[in-house]
Image (cartoon, helix red, strand yellow):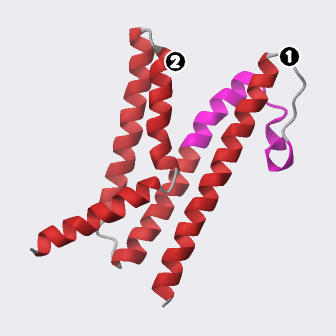
Amino acid sequence: MFRRLSIGLLIILGFVLGYFREFVFESINAHLALQQMNSPSELSGILSIFNSFSPSLLYYTKFALTAFFALLFLLISLALIKAVFQTTKYFKWAYFFYLFVFGTSLVLFAMGKVIGLPEQLYMVSRYIQEIIQSPLASFMLIPAIYLYQKEKQA
């Protein structure tokens, strides 16, 4: 019973964190867009700490927030793997998956700068990065591990 409850709570936590992450990035992006148009803009609530940031600092802060949210979702993925499979031996799957997605995204971002398509490959990189900043990573990892276990038993 506790196992099912913890799995359910972790899934809910993943969705709540996903919505919060989306709120943070959408708010910051809207704030930056208004600043570019020289329109007054202030972030409210918990995001008001970013009001004193220059546009360039806020832009680069988004990269740190990306890593922060990816780390939080990695921790949720690890907790879900432990709760579902009752072992930590599949943690390496999560580490590899997160590093692979992050690395792929980083390579695409860098390639965009090098080959002169920074905006196009930035968008692709950003979309790929969203996989590990949402519950989607867990929903890919857990079935993959389950299928691996079934294949190994057969």
* Left or right placement of residue 79 versus residue 100 in this view: right
* Left or right placement of residue 10 versus residue 124 in this view: right
- The residue nearer to you, when weighing 30 against 56, is 30
The structure residue drawn at horizontal position 67% and vertical position 39%, both measured from the top left corner, is 25
The secondary element bearing badge 1 is classed as loop
The picture places residue 74, in percent across and down from the top left corner, at: 47, 56
* Left or right placement of residue 118 versus residue 52 in this view: left
Residue at mark 1? 38
Q: Are marks 1 and 2 in contact (CB under 8 Å)?
A: no
Above or below: residue 46 compared with residue 121: below
Above or below: residue 4 compared with residue 34: below
Above or below: residue 57 compared with residue 79: above
The secondary element bearing badge 2 is classed as helix
Amino acid of disc 1: Asn
The picture places residue 12, in percent across and down from the top left corner, at: 58, 68
Q: Is residue 58 magenta?
A: yes
Above or below: residue 152 compared with residue 27: below
Write down the region rendered in magenta.
44-66
Residue at mark 2? 119
The picture places residue 119, in percent across and down from the top left corner, at: 52, 18
The structure residue drawn at horizontal position 39% and vertical position 26%, both measured from the top left corner, is 108
Amino acid of disc 2: Glu
